[in-house]
Amino acid sequence: MDTLRLRFDSADDDHPLSVGVHGVGRPHDGAGLAPVESSPLVNFCVDRRGVWLTVPEGTRGVHVNGRPVLRMAMLRVGDSVFVDGSGIRVVASRPPTQPAGGFGDSTGESGDVRIVLRGVGGRYHGRCLTLERPRLVGRAPEADIRIDEPAFAERHARLELLRGDVVLRDLGSPDGSLVNGEPVRDAVLRPGDQVVFDAHHRFVLEAPVGIFDRAARDDGDPAEDTGPARGRSVMHLPWLVLAAAVLAALLALLLLFGTG
């Protein structure tokens, strides 16, 4: 699994989240937040289960995605943590994948009801939208994800299935979107990715395990799939002939000794 990183609003360098405990607090110069050896304001604990935020007793004003945290919270890539007025984002080690050049307009292909956008923050928290068809994000009345903010674009972005990939396409918005904590215009999304619109409307993409791998195989050359199957049928043929010969011999013996 790729190592996640902490991106501080007040620093230029990301901090990698290797397995263990990472304390974050005010450095000696008091400017912003940074990893510290002692007296942390919060701890980021990393184990095989994921990343946990723990808040020591006495720390106040800790929020994850706008929600207050008093003791502990499990984090996912793309989450925003605010501590004592400063921001931290959990980001992936690599930026989101960009769509292949010339992906163009919608292909008109059907989507998949098993691919779901689950709201985890903002107006759509707790709601799910399936991607059996393209979904429009914007301020327009016909938008599937409607964000009624004056500064938000009427047609902000579209999410759809294009050639086996879930693609986020910017439609000319002023600021773009966030995918796993990274600002983007367009991006290819994978299960578990977090998408944020207008700073606090959050969604996580969910899909059955292996669904995109199967889609890629289904788009392959049919001749590559039928060749091995044809070979297996040929291999099975001698066994069928042998079994028929044995049955015929047994019937002949039965008739011979039964009439004797």
Image (spheres, grey):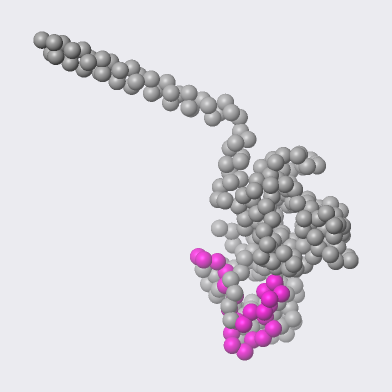
Q: Nearer the viewer, residue 142 or 204?
A: 142
The residue sitting at 55% across, 50% down in the picture is 209
Q: Where does residue 196 sit, x and y in percent of width and height?
A: 74, 62
Which residue is painted at 70% across and 72% down in the image? 65
Residue 16 image offset from top left, x and y in percent? 62, 67
Quick check: 220 above or below 26? Answer: above
Q: Left or right: where does residue 122 sit relative to residue 209?
A: right
The answer to whether residue 83 is magenta is: no
Picture coordinates of residue 229, whole percent (x, y): 48, 27
Query: Magenta stretch?
Result: 48-70
Tell me where residue 156 sits by quadrant. Answer: bottom right
Farthest-out residue, front: 259
Q: Relative to the observer, which residue lies in front, 23 or 113?
A: 113
Q: Residue furthest right?
A: 150
Q: Residue at x 48, y 23 (%)?
A: 230
Q: Where residue 1 appears, x then y in whole percent?
A: 56, 58
Vertical position of residue 151 compared to residue 239: above or below? below
In the rendered view, tell whether residue 181 sits above or below residue 99.
Answer: below
* Quadrant of the snapshot with the C terminus: top left
- Any part of residue 190 in sight: no
Q: Is residue 68 magenta?
A: yes
Query: Is 160 located above or below residue 253 in the figure?
Result: below
Name the image quarter holding residue 195: bottom right
At x 88% / y 65%, what residue is drawn?
151
